Image (cartoon, helix red, strand yellow):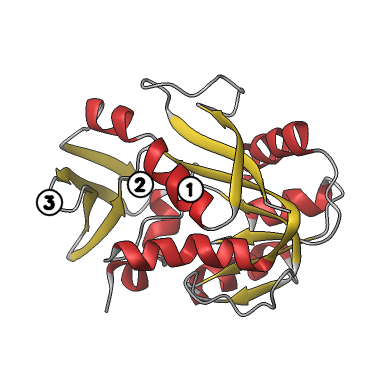
Amino acid sequence: MTWYQEWFGEEYLELYAHRDEHEARRQVAFFREHVGSVDGLILDLACGTGRHLVELNEMGYDAAGCDLSFTLLRTGIDEHGSLPVARADMRALPFCNDSFGGLVNFFTSFGYFATEDENLQVVREMARVLRPGAVFLFDYLNVDRELEKLVERETIETPSGPVQIERWFDPRDRSFNKRITIGQKRYLERVRGYDLDEISTMFTSSGLSIRQAFGDFDGAPFNAPSPRLILVGSRAR
């Protein structure tokens, strides 16, 4: 079983409980500010429990979500009621070509897979399901910032007890790794670190055009110290 099949469950939800509806509301407001109205359905790719999906619909968009984790999807439905979601693998989305007028991908939900081709396939799927001219927002880590600020070990207190976290960067595959120990259980997070040039190449080759690159959800321009890499653009017409 791969790390992302094991980790995105109840322990994940507890560790990241601070990622709440207030954060989601702010991020969706950023999307609205920089994209405006959207003609057609928006896909929340890797939607998790649907916190952004709820905010998108409350702000007047027509949005649906998909995620691989049954636990996250089920938790979202339990918390929010009926949600328009599907269980899906990002590498092979169960949607027709040109289905969506927009797409959002929040909280570094990219770079999970073992090979470059698999990660590129995610971008190709994003482009495939978007209509020509459809908009996207892609929220990812900043490689330079992550390398500079890497905290190798820390302990986080949660309602269920302490969580031990170890972090390291593997230069062989340029991956950021996090080992999470909760009691007797141990999990791994692994994300391939792509810089802006690499992502731009992947997007352009797949027919996605980047219009702006931001460094945070306050709208600051992207640069080396930026906490995030947030791309706004559209599928080529």
Q: Is residue 84 visible?
A: yes
Q: Disc 3 marks which amino acid?
A: Arg
Q: Is 164 in front, or is 7?
A: 7
x, y percentage for residue 51? 64, 53
Mark 3 or mark 1, whichever is nearer to me: 3
Residue designated by label 1: 17
Where is the C terminus found, in terms of image quarters? bottom right
x, y percentage for residue 178? 23, 50
- Left or right: residue 44 compared with residue 37: left
Question: Of label 2 and label 3, which has the lower sequence position?
Answer: 2
Residue sitting at x 20%, y 33%:
151
| Mark 2 and mark 1 residues within 8 Å of each other at the beta carbon | yes
Crowd class of label 1 (few under 14; some 14 to 19; many from 20; radius 10 Å) = few
Residue designated by label 2: 158
User: Which numbered marker is on residue 40?
Assistant: none
Residue designated by label 3: 172
CA–CA distance between discs 3 and 1?
A: 32 Å
Q: Disc 2 marks which amino acid?
A: Thr
Question: Of label 3 and label 1, which has the lower sequence position?
Answer: 1
x, y percentage for residue 167? 19, 43
Residue sitting at x 35%, y 60%:
112
